[in-house]
Amino acid sequence: MIGGGPAGLTFARVLHRHDHPVTVLERDPAPDARPPGGTLDLHENLGQLALDKAGLLAEFRALSRPEGQAMRILDTDGTVLRDWRPRPDDRANPEIDRGQLRDLLLGPLDVQWGRGVTEVVPGTRDGVLVRFADGRQETFDLVVGADGAWSRVRPAVSSATPHYTGVTVVETSLDDVDTRHPDLARLIGDGSVAVYGVNRGLVAQRNSGGHVKVYAQFRAPLDWHTSLDRHRGVNRRAGLDAGLGAVLGAGLDLADVEAVRSRLLALFEGWAAPVLDLLRHGTAFVPRPLYVLPVSHTWAHVPGVTLLGDAAHLMPPLGVGANLAMLEGAELAESVAAAPGPGDLDEAVRAFEEQMWARAGRWAKFTMAGLERLVSPDPTEALAFFDEVQPS
């Protein structure tokens, strides 16, 4: 297993439960080498099902935050348009911090940290050859690539590479929000608050421990922070109105926190002051352009190599990717554990791929359509999208 994210760790944890040997190779030097990211809502029939297969559902429920399913949508003037709140017994999509989920999945697993992979070569005499950044190489019977958007395993089975969606997210954070920013804590509530305008949106999501992630999202060229003159045509193709293009286009040093804050405040100028406070009180700003793989990404089966999660079907982050990745990891692990012998392993993987492609293709189509509606020239499309997916 290459990759120690939700997909790879779920795969390994289910195999561990079946007393099946597995090696997890992760390029990060340690579990806490970088921030784990925000919170995840694990769906009852996807991520939670995967945890059940790993024997971890009860532990997840003890850690998760069902109240985090709450969702509030505001107009740009601060008017509350929708305010969805979960029932006390609602566990359809409870939230859990990514770091907590990682630690839950790690458990007794033996992960080899600091093992960056540079290349995977199938079809050698001794199996699948894996080359590492430190110059070493090893062979394995089965290599599973769960190493994310820029997978080093993917080229062994597919020539596809991620492409930019035209939407960029800039992430910032608020700490100790209940004490330091009680007005914002009330605005966000127990879950998330979202505001949508023309080709842009602002979303704040509560994590545990008073930590809040804030995401400013907008349509722009990939290098939106450079000269406007170079991108006037690209701005039009990206669906940018002239005002938004003018705000984004001038040169900007993305490492200059105050300059980025000022640019974002200008981008959302005229929105309600409490909404803009989400940006005013943010700390560092991290740009995250959204990339995807083709909606129906498949490949000709290659014996000894397969992919999971973002490595297989990178899609917009609309609450589905990690869920799918975890369920795929659990299902593949069960298929591997059930294979009677080495000769049956390849057929088990092939059957798993067919099932994964069909399901992931449906979700990729849904999330791409969702992104188009959430960051749209018509903000009412975002509200309509949430009306369709939120429980009544």
Image (cartoon, helix red, strand yellow):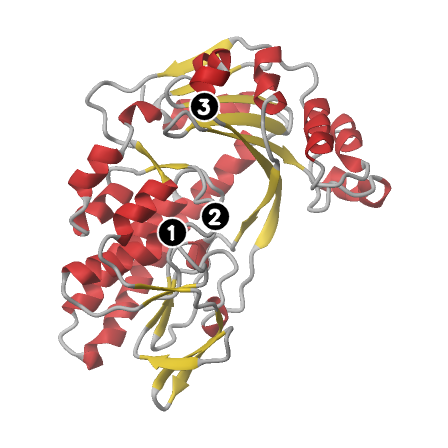
Closer mark to the observer between disc 2 and disc 1: 2
Real-space CA distance between mark 1 and mark 3, rounded to the nearest whole angstrom: 37 Å
Left of 238 or right of it: where is 3?
A: left
Residue 176: mark in rendering = 3
Q: Name which residue type carries label 1.
A: Ala
Work out whether mark 2 precedes mark 1 in sequence or the reverse, and give the earlier one.
Answer: 2
Query: At which x and y percent is residue 126?
Result: 34, 88
Q: Residue at x 23, y 57 (%)?
A: 13
**Which element carries disc 2, helix, strand or loop?**
loop
Toward which corner of the image does residue 142 lie, by quadrant?
Answer: bottom left
Residue 146 higher or lower than 119, as above or below = above
Q: Name which residue type carries label 3.
A: Asp
**Residue 134 visible in rendering:** yes
Q: Residue at x 48, y 10 (%)?
A: 80
Dot 2 and dot 1 residues touching (CB under 8 Å): yes
Q: For mark 2, what is the residue?
A: 315
Query: At which x and y percent is residue 363?
Result: 40, 45
Residue neighbourhood size for the residue with mark 1, other residues' Cα within 10 Å, grouped as few (<14), some (14–19), many (≥20): many
Query: At which x and y percent is residue 98?
Result: 37, 42
Residue 71: mark in rendering = none
Closer mark to the observer between disc 1 and disc 3: 3
Query: At which x and y percent is residue 4?
Result: 37, 57
Q: For mark 1, what is the residue?
A: 360
Toward which corner of the image does residue 198 lie, by quadrant?
Answer: top right
Work out whether mark 3 precedes mark 2 in sequence or the reverse, and give the earlier one.
Answer: 3
**Which element carries disc 3, helix, strand or loop?**
loop
Left of 168 or right of it: where is 106?
A: left
**Residue 188 visible in rendering:** no
